[in-house]
Image: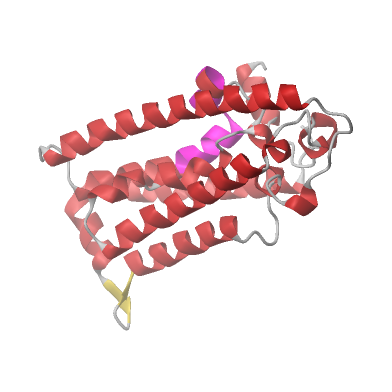
Amino acid sequence: MVMTKMMKNYLVKLVLRISVFVIVFGMYIYDKELLISLAMQPLYMGITSMHVLWLVFMLMMLKHLFPKGMITMALLKREEKKYQEVEGYSKIELLEFVQDQNQKAWKVMLVWLIGNGLVGLVYSMNWIGQAELFLLTVFYFLCDYICILFYCPFQSHIMKNRCCINCRIYDWGHFMMFTPMILIKSFYTWSLFFMAAIVLIHWELVYAKHPERFYFGSNKRLQCANCKDKTCQIKRKVTGR
């Protein structure tokens, strides 16, 4: 396995996300009410863990809107300066690709909304509470990197894309992560969800306006031979693709 800088970066972040999930899950099992109270307990000058998490997540999403530093090729493919045109590419094949990927993306969105709609129904019936919604969000936070590095059900069963670099819905992650937060009436939860929606909308607008940047048949940077991230190595062994 080739250990690229991006691969190392992802693995380190995966360990951090696993640690966060284990800590939150452990606290939930021990005392779920304590989990919520600790999140709201002041750390310094009225600043709570919730404020810190909110700021971290907001900065994380702003980085997707204004990329700087070490950024994956999957995100940079939307940038005009990173586009490397394949000479003489077929515009008909591009159109067919876009139509196919759009239809599959809508299927993913439908599946996601139905699944989380059931979560909302259970929440409205008071079968689960805010602690469970917070735990679910942290679980989605972890699953984001599991999907990138090991196995993604949307990729395998619906999108059928070659890798995350070529993923049509790559920047939907934050929207999916913070979907449960829409159920909690708070400035912090709703602002996270709506910022995530802005990230998704920005991605969709660029995709609609410049689809050639998102197709390996028209963008050289998306071809395996030119990939510098190589974050698909473990996933290919797991899925056999």
Residue at image location 31% in from the left, 57% down from the top: 190
In the figure, residue 195 lies in which quadrant?
A: bottom left
Colour scheme: secondary structure
Tell me which secondary structure the magenta stretch mostly adopts: helix
For this orientation, the residue located farthest to the top is 240
Residue at image location 68% in from the left, 31% down from the top: 232
* Residue 68: % across, % down: 68, 62
Residue at image location 21% in from the left, 49% down from the top: 130
- Asked if one can make out residue 28 in the rendered structure from this viewpoint, the answer is no
- Asked if one can make out residue 196 in the rendered structure from this viewpoint, the answer is yes
* Residue 2: % across, % down: 79, 36
Vertical side of 172 occupied by 100: above or below: above
Q: Is residue 183 left or right of residue 176?
A: left
* Residue 69: % across, % down: 70, 61
Residue stretch in magenta: 142-157
Residue 166 covered by magenta stretch = no
Residue 148 covered by magenta stretch = yes
